[in-house]
Image (cartoon, rainbow, N blue to C red):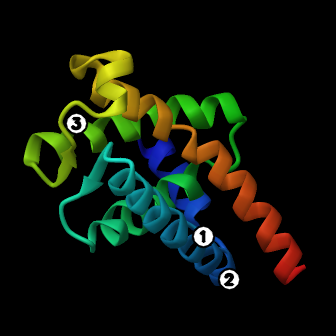
Amino acid sequence: MKKSISWIREQLKVDRKLIITYCVVYFIWGNLMNWFGAEVEIAEFTYWWQVITCYLLYMVPISLVLRSLPSHMQYAYGLIAMGLLEFSGYFLGTSYAFPNNILDQLIGIRNFTLGMALFFAFYFPLGNWGVQRIYRLVFK
């Protein structure tokens, strides 16, 4: 356990510019996805500030920890992280799924949260790839 915690701490020791890049990219991405989910009536956050708590305070640190792993491992660990987030969001009522939305129609209402977790787990490998490209372009 100590070895794992030590490894996680090492992964979080990064340049502040990289953290800012993650925060800007994930904040924009989170707002766009929340807007899109509301526009097409799939799902949305109950409160606007959840983009900050979910994308910046939850997903950015996880992305930083996972960024050195291969893509398939980022997805696998991201699936666990997003499964917990999606489940808790709908359980606590801080996320709202529109009734009879397109995903309910395609995969069924009982599979909605699983489908969301499977989709959003791609954020970690895609986000890490995109942020690295932007960071290198801007700061190197």
Percent of width and height locating residue 81: 39, 40
| Residue at image point 74% right, 52% down | 129
The numbered mark, 1 or 2, whose residue comes first in the sequence reads: 2
Closer to us: 99 or 8: 99
Structural distance between the alpha carbons of marks 3 and 1: 24 Å
Q: Is residue 138 above or below residue 93?
A: below
Q: Between tags 3 and 2, which lies in front?
A: 3
Closer to us: 127 or 6: 127
Task: Count neighbours of disc 2 (C-alpha within 10 A) and say few if under 14, some if 14 to 19, many if 20 or more.
Answer: few
Circles 3 and 1: CB atoms closer than 8 Å: no
Q: Between tags 1 and 2, which lies in front?
A: 1
Task: Count neighbours of disc 3 (C-alpha within 10 A) and say few if under 14, some if 14 to 19, many if 20 or more.
Answer: some
- In what element is the residue under mark 1? helix
The numbered mark, 3 or 1, whose residue comes first in the sequence reads: 1
Residue ranking furthest to the left? 92
- Quickly name the residue at label 3: 87
Q: Is residue 113 left or right of residue 6?
A: left
- In what element is the residue under mark 2? helix
Amino acid beneath label 1:
Val
Task: Count neighbours of disc 1 (C-alpha within 10 A) and say few if under 14, some if 14 to 19, many if 20 or more.
Answer: some
| Residue at image point 88% right, 74% down | 137
- Quickly name the residue at label 1: 25
Q: Is residue 2 above or below residue 115?
A: below
For the N terminus, the image quarter is: top left
Quarter-wise, where is residue 101 in the image?
top left
Amino acid beneath label 2:
Lys
Mark on residue 17? 2
